[in-house]
Amino acid sequence: MKQFYIRSKVEDKMGVIYLKGHLDAHNVGRFEREVLKLIGNNIVKIVVNCNELTYISSAGMGIIMGYLDEIREKQGDIKLCCVNKRVYEIFDLVGFTEIYDFLKDEQIALNKFKNVS
Amino acid sequence: MFPEKPQLSINIPSKTDLLKMIVGITKHVATLNHFSNSDSQKIALAVDEAITNVMKHSYNYKKNENVKLEYFSNTRGLKIKIIFRGIPPIFDTKSVDINKLIKRKRKGGLGVKLIKSIMDSLIYKTVDDINYCEMIKWKKKK
């Protein structure tokens, strides 16, 4: 049984990664490959859509953290959207809510990128 | 005092595909012991983080090693003991600065921060080549 699903799209030179299900150390490699694929294609304005994400451990958060500096050096950023209350609490515990923009929907997150480009 | 005999004891091989199962079991044990859904989910995450650390740092992702989990409960709280061999964990006792981790492009370092944020007590010790991780979560006073 698959426990984690990931897909992404590129729109107006911005990337959106959709996370679904349970993201932990077992499947984090798939998330990392998706982030690296976008960076490799010079897509550095990235929205992580967590609408269907039910669980995240530090392994998943480590990917969001580990590439942020490189992405910001390239004038990009990572924004998170559609995070449910329980997952938001976990992001908050490690201090992500002070470092990343958390937006209530994907379009608002994409518009924020458009406003600064 | 927690009872000497665990409420539940589980032996698992050191395979990351079992982490989700352990999260489910731990959440269930915490709920049975009258922790809220939110606290049970967090306790399960703390156990996930501790076992992931064992698989990564102590066993270097070797899949043929063993991890034993023991759950002890009383009216005041829940104690979870993780017993494993391999390289004893060494953790920086200083608080983790997330901005420094970002600057150093680190992908790790958040697991222990999460455990310490969630649990009320975290102790690692090694006795006769066997490593022990003990964590306790007390129930909120009503």
Image: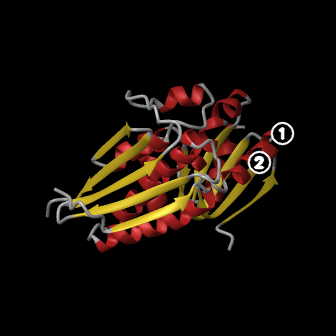
Residue type, label 1: Gly
Whether residue B127 is situated above or below residue B74 in the rendered picture: above
Q: Earlier in the sequence, mark 2 or mark 1?
A: 2
How far apart are the two marked residues, 2 and 1, measured between alpha carbons?
10 Å
Q: Nearer the viewer, residue B11 or A89?
A: B11
- Where residue A67 sits: x, y (%)? 67, 36
**Residue B17 in sight here:** yes
- Tell whether label 1 touches label 2 (CB within 8 Å): no
The circle drawn on residue A40 is: 1
- Where residue B26 sits: x, y (%)? 41, 65
Which residue is identified by label 2? A33
| Circle 2 Cα neighbour tier, 10 Å, few/some/many (<14 / 14–19 / ≥20) | few
* In this rendering, position of residue B104 left or right of residue B136: right
Give the residue at x 37% y 60%: B70
Secondary structure under the numbered disc 1 in the rendered image: helix
Snapshot colouring? secondary structure
Chain of the residue on which disc 2 is drawn: A
Residue occupying the far front of the picture: B128
The circle drawn on residue A81 is: none
* In this rendering, position of residue B29 left or right of residue B10: left
Whether residue B26 is situated above or below residue B1 in the rendered picture: below
Give the residue at x 36% y 38%: B125
